[in-house]
Amino acid sequence: MAVYTEVSFEELENFLKSYDVGTPRVFKGIAEGVSNSNYFLQTEKATFILTLYEKRIKTDELPFFLDLMEHLAALGIPCPTPVHAKNGSTTASLKDHSAAILTFLDGVSLCRPSTEHCLLAGSALANLHVKGKKISQHRENALGLSSWKAIAAEIMAEGNDVVDGVTKLVEAELDFLSMNWPSSLPSGIIHADFFPDNVLFVKNKISGIIDFYFACTDAFSYDLAVALNAWCFEADGSYNVTKGQALISGYDSVRVLEQSEREALPILCRGAALRFLLTRLYDWLNDSPDAFVKPKNPNEFVRRLRFHQSAAGPEAYGI
Amino acid sequence: MAVYTEVSFEELENFLKSYDVGTPRVFKGIAEGVSNSNYFLQTEKATFILTLYEKRIKTDELPFFLDLMEHLAALGIPCPTPVHAKNGSTTASLKDHSAAILTFLDGVSLCRPSTEHCLLAGSALANLHVKGKKISQHRENALGLSSWKAIAAEIMAEGNDVVDGVTKLVEAELDFLSMNWPSSLPSGIIHADFFPDNVLFVKNKISGIIDFYFACTDAFSYDLAVALNAWCFEADGSYNVTKGQALISGYDSVRVLEQSEREALPILCRGAALRFLLTRLYDWLNDSPDAFVKPKNPNEFVRRLRFHQSAAGPEAYGI
């Protein structure tokens, strides 16, 4: 959630001359998206999100993300799709930022998804993986295993001030994962940030999947591991095996997990927990006072990581 | 613009049980309102704003503001109107805050209103004053002359760190205004914060007047003086007499200014400039790191105050 760059109505009006989206009737900065400035835009024709990309998103990667959303939407995934300007482009410049207009999806994200929601989320994730196989674009996971060492190095000096003992935990985990990380699992387009914030519901049906700005090519089951971390832990830090079962069986109902993927789940969950622990620690230590959002507490991913470390096997997740 | 208090969808759902507004389809924190947390809420029935009142608004004053909006809306003023809960109340408690649901008005506020917009704003303000005469409620202006001394005392220690020489300017101006402030001007319900942010336009027509949380009983021409300060100065600090003429003649076309009001305009403009200079200085010095909004720069009201001090008479405003 953030508005870093303020856009006045007059600046918007000028920007919209390059588009054919109609006359704005509502234009409001919204508290959404960690790394971009987002505006809710309603015209007499439709509702949109105007996004100004801030530093975290590399301009040369934007076409990948926008093309991906356009392709996925065409394949029936309920995701935002970029609106083309009159000149055909899906990006334009606004206040020295790359900007895009995307279609708006109704729906609300849940803070405490139920077992039923987890089931729906699992099947939506599998559907994304299956449909995504038709997409030929490729993007390395910039936040995959090979990046974690570099982020770990950045948090070594002050990490223990935030979470007692975290640097030792991270170092040992990195060693373990480097030695044991699975390769040659079924791969393709993954969302890579499939948290409840990024899934919209209308009346207990999924109406939208948003925020594809971490999407990349990686193991499908790593995406499922991220989702298990994101959807199936309770506020007290405990793993809810009923929700885990629901998420996995929802996934399985659309795309059957291979044996290798099932077996790799505990280690993939460890990696996913470490990835979010590291980036949250980094954001915590590098908080911008201009942000509209407070950084998220890294602590909960310490607890999740410890759970995964103690998991005896895939059974611990409800498989 | 602010969201201080985060409300989850589940908390919203629970809160909405007391209302008959339909099922939420969109729920987003918006960067709007200086002292409240505001959420955009769309259901299958209609669009609303959910407001959580933060510390600046006294709970015992809420009924005045909400009743006022309800009355004004019934009198044809395009302003938000509170939605009654099933028990009839217009306020309820949400996350330890007083909260209200108000109807949402389409429209966008302008950063650089044109002369034409100033004309429309003037007539809308006069219309508010005329219609407001039918309302019997009364509220002292908590930010009127008698309050300025107390605020000035609060900024004396550090004010000069923000604006060089401001404490001397404020002291002298307070002395002058205390001696010369006009009394017995025509009075009634005024908006008291009639800035371009609080006036919404759709296709060059006024579609809404919002943010009545400074509304009170005071001189109508003081409200016009606030509007002259808010609408008729250019970014370079200069007064635009064409816009001033437009605002005043728009006002005059709906409610003819009395001679006493015309004559008082320069001193009322001085008072209005001082009021915003003082509160902006105060907010600047007491900025909350939790706010989504940066405080507004007090400096521009120093320049406006100096303009008003130099005004020879009402003619300086284009009368």
Image: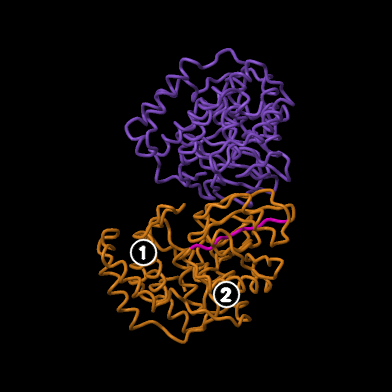
Chain colours: A purple, B orange
Q: Residue B103, relative to residue A7: is it above or below?
A: below
Q: Which residue is mark 2?
A: B64
Residue A273, position as x, y percentages in the image: 51, 30
Tag 2: residue type? Phe
Chain for numbered disc 1: B
Tell me the magenta residue range. Answer: B46-54
Q: Is residue B233 above or below residue A35?
A: below
In which quadrant of the rendered view does residue A226 lie?
A: top right
Q: Residue B282 has which mark?
A: 1
Please give left or right for residue A201 compared with residue A39 in the image. Answer: right
Which chain does the residue under circle 2 lie in?
B
Of residues B184 and A224, the one nearer the viewer is A224
Main secondary-structure element of the magenta-colored stretch: strand
Q: Residue at x 37, y 66 (%)?
A: B277
Query: Residue B196 at x, y = what percent?
Result: 52, 61
Towards the viewer: B247 or B164: B164
In the image, residue A43 lies at what x, y percent? Answer: 66, 48
Q: Distance between the Cα atoms at labels 1 and 2?
A: 25 Å
Label 2 element class: helix
Relative to B219, say whether B124 is above or below: above
